[in-house]
Amino acid sequence: MSTAVLVLRQRLRRVPISVVIVSIIFLVIVLLAILAPWVAPADPAKQNLLARLKPPGFELRGVTYWLGTDDLGRDLLSRTIYGGGVSLSVAVLSVVVSTLVGVTLGMVAGWFRGKIEIVIMRLVDIMMSIPAILLAVLTVAVLGPGFLKLVLVLGLTRWPRYTRVAYAQTLQIANLPFIKASELAGAGAARILFHHILPNIAGPVLIVATAEFGLMILMEAGLSFLGLGIQPPASSWGSIMSVGRQYLERAWWIVAFPGVCLFLLVFSVNVLGDWLRDQIDPRSRSR
């Protein structure tokens, strides 16, 4: 057996069983979302009023509705699978937007200092003083619902946390010898920021991104539940549960199954995020 295989086996043995379990759950949900057109048993938008509000396992004309149907007779399993893809897409894109904005502003504030630093960090303080979900609700109410608008709203309400992390890390790295050497060699500010500082703050930023990813999923679900997020005929877990709340006593499965999927996804992301933080920053284990 080669040395590389032995090293890999040793590292895998160090991974807690809880991390392995949540990793499997996360991968299954992601794969189902990506492969939705091929694994979903039915068209998520196809209506069949004869199968309206039927329980899990209901069969009609040779078609089995494994998770039941909603108020329009649509297959809940297919809608849950497709809804997972929508929720994940919104979360991923929102994290990308907030990361790009927040990290860029944080590095600029930490490098240039002076008035630029004051303006950016006071803006961060203002944004942090407003509850993110309240700001998102107000913004979506003004701009109107929609996929891209939801991504921008979520992304532009969560960038301050990245800015604070990038700012603090940039202040620490800016005075290191290799940065001073780059300045003496004639490197410009843009090159230093994106070629030298950014790679060295990627670890802390990644930790923040994993934590924010779970939060973005919850915020998207909350806004869609309120009718301010994903609009019909598209569906997300939040919008499915929003419909199901009207029939909670008659058709509990409409809320239960998307809710369980939402819980499992956010739980797995949080556990993976905590484990990743411990691997990147071992000092956090003793805190």
Image (tube, rainbow, N blue to C red):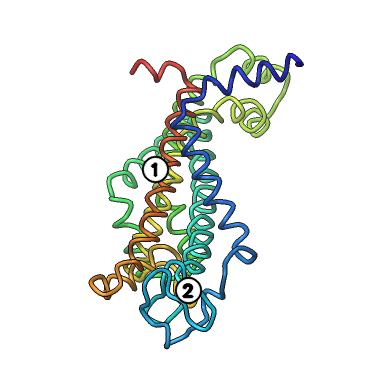
Residue that mark 1 sits on: 267
Q: Position of residue 159 (x, y in %)?
A: 44, 45
Above or below residue 63? Residue 167 is above
Q: Which residue lies at the image location 63% right of the left edge and 20% below the top edge?
A: 9
Q: Which residue lies at the image location 43% right of the left edge and 67% below the top edge?
A: 67
Above or below residue 63? Residue 163 is above
Left or right for 54, reference 174: left
Q: Amino acid at mark 1?
A: Phe
**Could you say whether the residue bearing mark 2 is in a helix, strand or loop?**
loop
Q: Which residue lies at the image location 46% right of the left edge and 45% below the top edge?
A: 213
**Could you say whether the residue bearing mark 1 is in a helix, strand or loop?**
helix
Q: Residue furthest right?
A: 2
Dot 2 alpha-carbon crowd within 10 angstroms: few under 14, some 14 to 19, many 20 or more: many
Q: Whole-Å distance between the Cαs marked 2 and 1?
A: 26 Å
Between residue 171 and residue 41, name the one nearer to us. Answer: 41
Residue that mark 2 sits on: 75
Between residue 205 and residue 23, name the one nearer to us. Answer: 23
Q: Residue furthest top?
A: 177
Above or below residue 259? Residue 271 is above
Residue 45: mark: none
Quadrant location of the C terminus in the rendered image: top left
Q: Which corner quadrant of the image does residue 254 belong to? A: bottom left
Left or right for 186, reference 272: right
Is residue 102 in view? yes
Above or below residue 69? Residue 177 is above
Q: Which residue lies at the image location 54% right of the left edge and 16% below the top edge?
A: 175
Q: Residue furthest left?
A: 249
